[in-house]
Amino acid sequence: MLIVTNATIANRGVLETRSLPKKFLGRVFLVPRGAGFGLWLRFVAEMQFLRYLLVLMPFLALPLISRDMALPVMQAPLVMVLLVAVIELRVLRLSKAARAGVVDPDSADRRLDTLAFRAHACLRRIAARHAIPEGELHLVIEQSELARIPPLTLVSVQTDRPEPRLMALDAEDRAALAGLFDAALTERDLLAVNHRSDTYIRAIAQESRAVSAHARLAAFLETKAAAS
């Protein structure tokens, strides 16, 4: 999971938005700060051009190995297209029938209820810590639709006040968001639900005015104690 905010993204210009929810995958390329090799490799896997290139690599290599293979390779564009289609549509993505069978409806509903419960708790904490008096906070969870490889999950907090924007989240905020997923609800669990519904971006809203005064006071005292 990558929490998308100013502190975690090097190319901050891609965080600007004019509408909510802001979508990233397939539209912009994020450059995460301090990412490990595994996360970088997963981001590279999202690049369609590189996936095509990898699939077609044998066709590019054969003419270099043997000149006799150059003409047959040049005459096989349909085979190349079919191979790319099989990899993209059958291997890296699930068919409609397969998507319907990855999780049963009751389990899907329970997972979404768990996610919503945790998301609202995170948003209330963030609204209290940042003393946000009004407006809606949106916890946006976006996942890659690619299957059979490790899931890629982007999490951000977006707001419509004073204009549509992604919130700047500090270490405490990010630590709270890290609790969205655990052994009881993993990223793969959510991805199975998203496969079933063919929905890969979810936005859960929390009205700031609904955050209790007790929660705001507790956040204030916690921040004051940390500062001292």
Image (cartoon, helix red, strand yellow):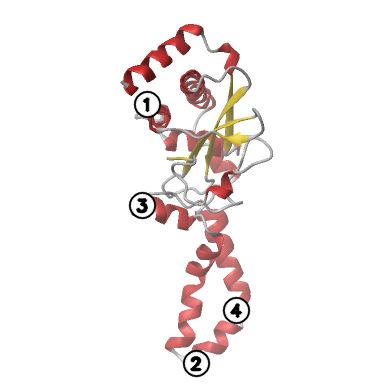
- Residue at the disc numbered 3: 38
Q: Earlier in the sequence, mark 1 or mark 4?
A: 4
The circle on residue 68 is 2
Q: Can residue 102 be seen in this view?
A: no
Residue 90 % position (x, y) = 54, 54
- Residue at 48% in and 23% down: 126
Q: Say few, some or many: other residues with alpha carbon within 10 Å of mark 4 (under 14 / 14 to 19 / 20 or more).
A: few
Looking at the rendered image, the disc whose residue lies closer to the viewer, 1 or 4, is 1
How far is the residue under mark 1 from the one under mark 4? 48 Å
Is the C-beta separation of discs 2 and 4 under 8 Å? Answer: no
- Residue at the disc numbered 1: 184
Q: Circle 3 sits in a helix, a strand or a loop, which is it?
A: helix
- Residue at 61% in and 83% down: 75
Q: In which quadrant is the C terminus drawn?
A: top left
Residue 80 % position (x, y) = 57, 72
- Residue at 60% in and 37% down: 199
Looking at the rendered image, the disc whose residue lies closer to the viewer, 3 or 2, is 3
Q: In which quadrant is the N terminus drawn?
A: top left
| Left or right: where 163 falls relative to 158 | right
Q: Find residue 66 and report its image quarter.
A: bottom left
Pick the front one: 69 or 1? 1
**Amino acid type for the residue under numbered disc 3:** Gly
Q: Which of marks 3 and 1 is nearer the N terminus?
A: 3
Residue found at the very far top of the displayed protein: 214
Pick the front one: 140 or 164? 164
Check the image and report above or below for 206 versus 1: above
